[in-house]
Amino acid sequence: MSVEYSVADRIARVTLNRPERMNAVDPATEAELEMVWRDIESRADISCVVLTGAGEKAFCAGADLKGGDNGIEKSGLQYWSQSHPHGFGGIAYRKSMDVPLIARVNGFALGGGFEIVLGCDIVISADTAKFGLPEARVGRMPLEGGMIQLQRKIPHNLAMGVMLTGKRFTAAEIASYGLINEVVPLAELDVAVQRWVDDIVACAPLSLRAIKQTVNRTSHLPPAEAQALRTPALIAALVSEDAGEGVRAFQEKRAPVWQGR
């Protein structure tokens, strides 16, 4: 299996497990990832997802370009003409996942790997990580999220500087663009990620889903229309038992006990 997936204590952990290929994504890996995302979407016992790459060298180096049975052999036109409704890795611009997604960036996040990062809600990076969209340097384009997402997340000139040069950028540089929540030494990466996970899991599960679903479904709308939209997860959270439990716990000065209903 090129993707490791486990769930425990309301936390899903997903690891791209192809360190010998810098965790590059081939068709088989892409299919495995899609199965994982669908499983997460179908479950009610997950409050947070942590996505990372195996080893210390790479988070994900993008598409596997080395050819062979598992590599990408299609022309750019053939690749672009195929349907990729959720972007690279099935996550670069996926809107159907209502669970918070953390990118644990342990190394190179290049091409599609950077596009995966752009699809995450929170990004925690080792200070040794490198980011970039080098597609133009090999006669390609960042088709599966880069050209779509980056310009929506940071100022135009910064986005174009990344895409039109194909350069590699440090974690500190990408953090200065507003794309990383926290940069830490590699040795402290797991501690930092766990701190963010703990804070997320401390929140009501239905509130988390309502927030993410509403953000995903209203980001393209004017404020008045966004405010008026009643997403299913929002309604479920408002009428939930947990909504009452949160108020009672606050009044009683204790930690809430979430039921997820």
Image (tube, rainbow, N blue to C red):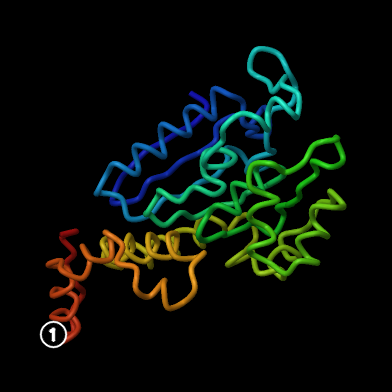
Image height check: is 1 above or below 136?
above
Judge by depth and name the residue closer to the eye, 44 or 194. Answer: 44
Judge by depth and name the residue closer to the eye, 35 or 55. Answer: 35
Question: What is the quadrant of residue 53 in the picture?
Answer: top right
| Residue for point 85% across, 51% down | 167
Judge by depth and name the residue closer to the eye, 82 or 153. Answer: 82
Residue 195 seen in the figure: no
Residue bearing the label numbered 1:
252
Residue 79 seen in the figure: yes
Q: In the picture provided, is 115 more to the left or to the right than 167?
A: left
Residue 118 coordinates in the image, percent (x, y) = 60, 54
Question: What is the quadrant of residue 78 in the picture?
Answer: top right
Question: What is the quadrant of residue 62 in the picture?
Answer: top right
| Residue for point 84% across, 48% down | 166
Image height check: is 175 above or below 98?
below
Q: In the picture provided, is 26 more to the left or to the right than 190?
A: right
Q: In the picture provided, is 126 more to the left or to the right than 254?
A: right
Image height check: is 253 above or below 200?
below
- What kind of residue is marked 1? Glu
| Residue for point 59% across, 46% down | 116
Q: Secondary structure at mark 1?
A: loop
| Residue for point 74% across, 26% down | 65
Residue 87 coordinates in the image, percent (x, y) = 57, 42
Residue 261 coordinates in the image, percent (x, y) = 15, 59
